[in-house]
Amino acid sequence: MHRPMTDDEHPPQPPGRSSSGSAFHIQWPEHLQELLRRMRSAPDFDTRNRATGEAWVLLNTLIVIRLRVQATRYGTTAQEDLEDIAVEKSLDLLRRAESGEWDPEHRAPSELAAFLMTVARNGLVDFLRKSGRVEPLAGDAGPDEDPRGAARAPLRASGEGPDADAERREFATALRGCAETLDVRTRMVWFLRVFCDLATKEIATHPSVRLKPGHVDVLLQRARRQIRTCMRRLGHESHDLPPGTFAEIWRLFRADEVYRP
Amino acid sequence: MNERESNFSPGGGGGNPPAEHLDSDVCVDLLHGLLDPARERELLAHLVTCPTCESLLQACVASRERLRATRSVQRLPSGEMVLVDAAAVEGSTSAARSAGQAGSLGSVLAGLARRPQGVWRAVAGGLAAAAVLLVVYLLALRPAPGPLPVTPLPVSFDAPVLLADLPGAEVDQLQDGLTAYAAGDYRRASECLEQKAGGGQIETYRLVYLGSALAFRGRYRESASVLRALPRRTIPNPWGSHVAWTLHEALRRSGQEESADSLLHVLAAGLGPDGDRARAMLDLPARE
């Protein structure tokens, strides 16, 4: 259960409802079905290959989110382990989808969501069994459990008053402005390190970067220096990233051509 | 079907109180660009003010980007799906290359020299030396690759308009590179174009000419490396087409036959003159 929030904390429309108050329809199930259709029956190899890759990334995200829910029930599991489980499970699902063993075509979104939760739970239980720890901490996690509890802790507690909120927003907007002065690839490198915590080697092999690790380090150093100078000029010391910063920066990345979901 | 399922609204619809936080499934939609722009703006505005939702999105983004950076699923020509580790690909390509080079000649010589004893050893040594000479001779006889079957790109001096926002030194460098390219001085062109020029379109522009100049200089591996990183499908013609065919040649001439063939099949699946040309090269029937 989430704590009630005040209007100050949530000035924009709550995200679960449209401005008319009606509920959103989740889009990913339909998108997944479409990708799997393309994966199975597109006439050319390239389209099938691309659809396979996209479906795999989407399934992975869905399973990782559900694994985080389950992990809260079964004790601490390293993030890397959860990601490894998701990699294995999503590939397995893709293979099963292709062979016809799993056919999500006419499944309701809720059924797909519940099925993926079961896949995640089984994957985690198998993993824990192999590593010799399988006892759930508190009952069994149902498919409706919200994964936020397992998500990264908030950067800083909210509720310090409107002044603090305004200050944070100003910081985030300034940082966004400074990040905009970096060229697209350098900005991507900086984003992947600062906000996604990727290692240099990982950044180097990222499809939007593709550079030698040494070059990545040079770009990172340059980006940091440039951002620091820019933020100082605007009167900010970028030691700490207050809440709201990631969302502001991510908005910027949505606009970048190089960042394709 | 439970209430959440029947409504499936973010935040738990179906009789629950209105959502206060971003639902993880909406987060997936947002992350994968599946929402309409108005809805996306609305959610992003909420995220800026809500650390809990922001941290959920951040965790999802980080996880997905790590995945994209480290692994991918690819199909083999046989249709089989395989998990590809990005780091392993980098390492194995060079390892396989050196193993292949050392293996072919090395195994022939080893085969010749392994068994014989005494006088035969000397004969075998002579044969091995002759084999080396023969290989060197055959390599020397191998015809040099002909001229690239692509015409140099026109140099559009719309470029100065695009260059207007770049610092002076970068404009000069880029301008020199393009001028050298137009004059057919590909060495000078590639040297000038090596230097990064801002970002966005102008950077793509620079890399297209750099990759092309490197190919015309015969530096195929470097050319392929530059050109394959470009978003080819989003580059308009004649540049897009030039990138495709120059990359194909560069891959082929640098010994990356499989990649060249794969690209050719991709082109053959497309429409227009590039598709026709690729299909002709593959002896495939023309499209109606």
Image: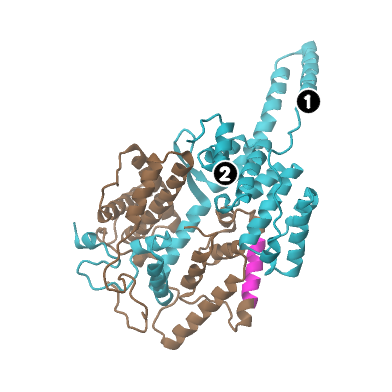
Chain colours: A brown, B cyan
Which residue shows up at 35% across the image and 66% down it?
Answer: A148
Whole-percent x, y for residue B36 in the image: 39, 64
Image check: A118 left or right of B129? left
Whole-percent x, y for residue B5 in the image: 23, 59
Question: Closer to the observer: label 1 or label 2?
Answer: 1
Q: Which mark is residue B89?
A: 2
Report the residue that reaches farthest toward the front: B288
Tag 1: amino acid:
Leu
Q: Which mark is residue B141?
A: 1
State the residue in front, A149 or A161: A161
Tag 2: amino acid:
Val
Looking at the image, residue B207 lies above or below residue A19:
above
Give the residues drawn in magenta, as a range.
Answer: A217-229
State the residue in front, B144 or A155: B144
Binning the other alpha carbons within 10 Å of mark 2 as few (below 14), some (14 to 19) or many (20 upward) gives: few
Binning the other alpha carbons within 10 Å of mark 1 as few (below 14), some (14 to 19) or many (20 upward) gives: few
Give yes or no for residue A91 being in the magenta stretch: no
Please report, as a chain letter, where disc 2 is located: B
